[in-house]
Image (cartoon, rainbow, N blue to C red):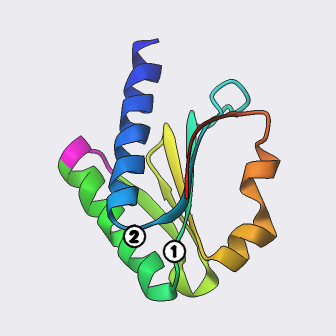
Amino acid sequence: MRCELEALDKARAIVDFLEEKKAEKIVLLDIHEVSSFTSYFIICNGTSDRMLEALSSAIREFVKKDFSQPIRVEGDSRTGWMVADLLDVVVHIFSPDQRNYYRIEQLWDKGKRLVSLQ
């Protein structure tokens, strides 16, 4: 239970950080009961390739500084979808078009929506 609480604290801190960095439509999903590979998904939008890249870089620095944890980021801002893997928290950074196309929230609708910010 303690590990789960720490993961939730980390996820909430990342949500707050993304909100400060002007990410849009931020959603935090608790998927620990329906996933074997992670506990939380954070899904957000950026308004341009530059913003996706900036959000990705900012998350890398934030996680490195605040959590002293390795982070792996996959994807390319030009494709409209980047994924930051922190093991117990996975952050999806989308362009609006790609988010609408992949509909991650609907794929993981058995998880609990904890946060939804516009």
In this rendering, the answer to whether 72 lies above or below 116 is below
Toward the front, the furthest residue is: 118
The dot on residue 46 is 1
The range drawn in magenta is 66-70
In this rendering, the answer to whether 105 lies above or below 25 is above
Most common SS among magenta residues: loop
Looking at the picture, which amino acid does disc 2 mark?
Leu
Mark nearest the camera among 1 and 2 is 1
Q: Nearer the viewer, residue 13 or 77?
A: 13
Name the residue tied to disc 2: 55
Left of 73 or right of it: where is 105?
Answer: right
How much space separates mark 1 and mark 2, taking CA atoms? 8 Å
Residue 103, quarter of the rendered image:
bottom right
Disc 2 is placed on an element classified as helix
Label 1 vs 2, first from the N-terminus: 1
Looking at the picture, which amino acid does disc 1 mark?
Gly
In the picture, which quadrant includes the C terminus?
bottom right
Please state the horizontal and vertical placement of residue 34, each as a whole percent of the image: 73, 29
Please state the horizontal and vertical placement of residue 11, each as a whole percent of the image: 43, 40
Please state the horizontal and vertical placement of residue 96, each as a whole percent of the image: 65, 75
Please give the name of the residue rendered at 81% of the width and 49% of the height, measured from the top-left corner.
107
